[in-house]
Image (tube, helix red, strand yellow):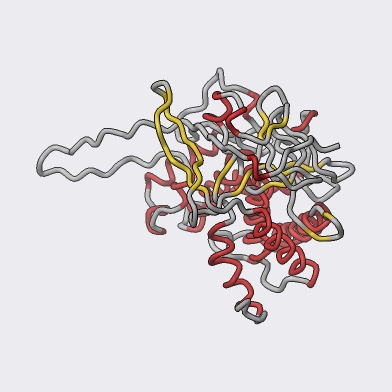
Amino acid sequence: MSPHIVPIATLALILSAGTAAPACAVSPPQGESQSPAPSWGSQIVRRPAAWYGTEEARRLAAAVSLHQSAEGGWPKNTDLFAAPRADADPGLANTIDNDGTTLPLDFLARVITAGDQTARPAFERGLDYLLKAQQPNGGWPQFYPLRGGYYDQITYNDDAMVRVLHLLQAVAEGRAPYGFVDAARRARAAEAVQAGTALILKTQVRRDGRLTAWCAQHDAVTLAPAWARRFEPPSLSGNESVGIVRFLMSIDQPSPEVIAAVEGAVAWFRSSALPDFRIESLQTDGKPDRRVVAAPGEGPIWARFYDLETNQPIFMGRDSVPHANLADIEQERRAGYNYVGTWPANLLKTDYPAWRARLGLPSEG
């Protein structure tokens, strides 16, 4: 049964979040130019195409390959440009969480496309790992091989499964930088995307007969919304549902079922918006903090978790007790987790109208 949540009108939101101290700019000596060394992170796949053909890129690709596991996956939260550590945490290995495995494959593909065939065996092992990690239900767990617990659930959380589907979709279609992938693997990728898309349609939650959104995790057997960590309850997600909808909108020729899923989710985003709020940054007791204040005419914002029965926002700390007010969550969680955000805003304003126009659907007005 879903936790009881009081009406939305009683919300008194205060969101605390840690912010990093600004980096100090250091000017290079006069007469010298500064070219920062590449660092591992999502920005590594946004460099000019020519760079991936350089000796530096090839050297870094070789470093990334050293972190690949015997199963073919890569760890998360690890600097893959640094030498592997003998004392590395094995709990981080073989995952699709936090760009694990998908980002290394994206980077290696760009280096291979630029001419470095030495990186191809590692790429192919990694791609085979992703294909093998897909479960009979069509979804991906957070870790593979399976570890038990919530890690084995269908993992939409933090766009983990969506990143896999986007990568396999590009592989299947032979899009850059995956044009070198052989026909057999492209065919397997296409089948995997088809199964993953079917699962997305099956797991979309219906309320009163209407399609709404998705939970961040779904049970691997029943497909029902499921618990993850103690502060991540079964619920409708105002965050992860955005990534799922963007994936569905990326399908070139969507079926009527896919179109209905997008339309249902968009209607839910609109009905679940919290208008007339603004997020402000401040200091509380010397620590970075944020609060959400009443701001008529501004917003909207969305909660990350919505009650499955009432559709009211849920705020839950490590004690797993649901609250209607974010102020009631312990400061450590308010500072360390995004319970409120503007995730659907650009989708509703830009992506959704463009999608309807691409499909030749009537303008909303």
Left or right of 279? Residue 208 is: right
Q: Is residue 182 visible in this depiction of the protein?
A: no
Residue in the foreground of this view, choosing between 55 and 76: 76
Q: Quadrant of the N terminus?
A: top right
Residue in the foreground of this view, choosing between 82 and 166: 166
Please, is residue 102 above or below residue 143 in the view? below
Q: Is residue 91 visible in this depiction of the protein?
A: yes
| Residue 29 drawn at (x, y percent) | 13, 37
| Residue 83 drawn at (x, y percent) | 47, 28
Q: Quadrant of the C terminus?
A: bottom right
Q: Residue furthest right?
A: 222
Which residue shows up at 81% across the image and 45% down it? 309
Which residue shows up at 71% across the image and 43% down it? 7
Which residue shows up at 70% across the image and 22% down it? 319
Figure quadrant of residue 39: top left
| Residue 305 drawn at (x, y percent) | 68, 42
Figure quadrant of residue 262: bottom right
Left or right of 339? Residue 60 is: left
Which residue shows up at 49% across the image and 42% down it? 293
Q: Residue furthest left?
A: 30
Please, is residue 286 above or below residue 179 in the view? above
Left or right of 119? Residue 49 is: left
| Residue 108 drawn at (x, y percent) | 53, 48
Q: Residue furthest top?
A: 87
Residue in the foreground of this view, choosing between 61 and 138: 138
